[in-house]
Image (cartoon, grey):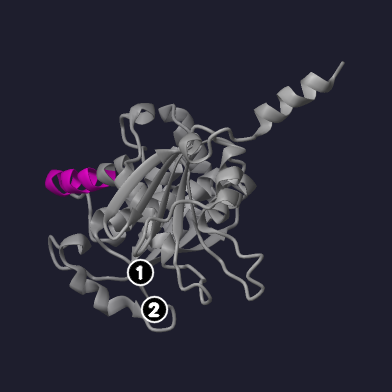
Amino acid sequence: MRINWSCSHTVDSTWLQVMQNVADATEIVCGLSSLLIGLQICGDEEIRVLNRNFRNLDRATDVLSFPLIQYGPGKMLPDHPEYLKSVYDDEEGLYCLGDVIISADHVRQQALEYGHPEEREAAYLLVHAICHLMGYDHMNETEKKKMRMMEEKILESVGMGQSGETSTITDETLMELARRAMEHSYSPYSRFRVGAALLSTDGRIFQGCNVENASLGITCCAERTALFKAVSEGARSFSAIAIASVGTAPWPCGVCRHALYEFAPDLRVIVTWDQQKAEMSLKELLPHGFGPDELARGQKGTDR
């Protein structure tokens, strides 16, 4: 899902990554694609003004949703994708669902109140808002139950359900995110598209695709694109990576194996192609790998 971000408040980058993860998961769970939303992260005073102007409620709130689709009674987008025709943006080539405003002040306050991480609260509020953009509501108990079931299904798919720390991101979700990353591949020379989705131990998912270059030598593989993105956002520990392509199993090249070994020698490596799947550990793919631990032992051995 494409998010057009607007942040008037400084927030931790983990919020943004986790929010992007749940937005992408929404498409997967609902069987949709090519969606676009606008998302503004502001403070209580800004959202109070909007709440007063649009809802005649002169108080701050946690989240506001402004859907562009006018749904019929009891209609929700996952069951009625034909509604998307009315919001297709020719220039973007995407379906624009509407806009979401989230108060960073409320995120922090409610995370403290409920006793869970701020990024989890930010993710929940975004999922709640996107569900509103898709026609879900909570005006009565029946509607509320349907909406809550969809919210929980989306959050569970990325390991953020009510079960909290014990929930896990499924291999199916990780592989689907890799396939979607593959769609952005820049591979005019090899014409071999690859996408990757790297799962950090803190629950964030970082996607990447292969980016080729006319010089050929400085081409960057999907695995390293995802890894470098993750490290640049502060992630240093990883549990699994899914790599997707078409036609053949996209096992990582030697350079990518070494790059991943630096941070996650015990990484699970899942490859998927043509609806097939295979898995090996990074240590199986790179036996006798050389990483920070080996370097430290070598330096210690020369310190006499």
- Using a 10 Å C-alpha cutoff, classify the residue at mark 1 as few (fewer than 14 neighbours), some (14 to 19) or many (20 or more): few
Q: Position of residue 38 (x, y in %)?
A: 45, 65
Tag 2, which secondary structure?
Answer: loop
Instruction: Assess whether mark 2 and mark 1 are in contact (beta carbons under 8 angstroms).
Output: yes
Instruction: Look at the picture and state if 211 lies above or below 140.
Output: below
Is residue 132 in view from this perspective?
yes
Q: Which residue is mark 1?
A: 34
Q: Quadrant of residue 130?
A: bottom left
Q: Which residue is mark 2?
A: 93
Q: Main secondary structure of the magenta part?
A: helix
Q: Quadrant of residue 180?
A: bottom left
Q: Amino acid at mark 2?
A: Gly
Residue at 59% across, 35% down: 289
Q: Is residue 94 magenta?
A: no
Left or right, 121 with respect to 259, comes to: left
> Which comes before the other along the chain, label 1 or label 2?
1
Tag 1, which secondary structure?
Answer: loop
Give whichever of 229, 89 is nearer the camera.
Answer: 229
Q: Position of residue 189 (x, y in %)?
A: 53, 76
Residue at 56% across, 56% down: 225
Q: Is residue 147 magenta?
A: yes
Instruction: Look at the picture and state if 113 lies above or below 160.
Output: above
CA separation in Å, label 1 and label 2: 8 Å
Q: Position of residue 173 (x, y in %)?
A: 33, 48
Magenta part of the chain: 140-151
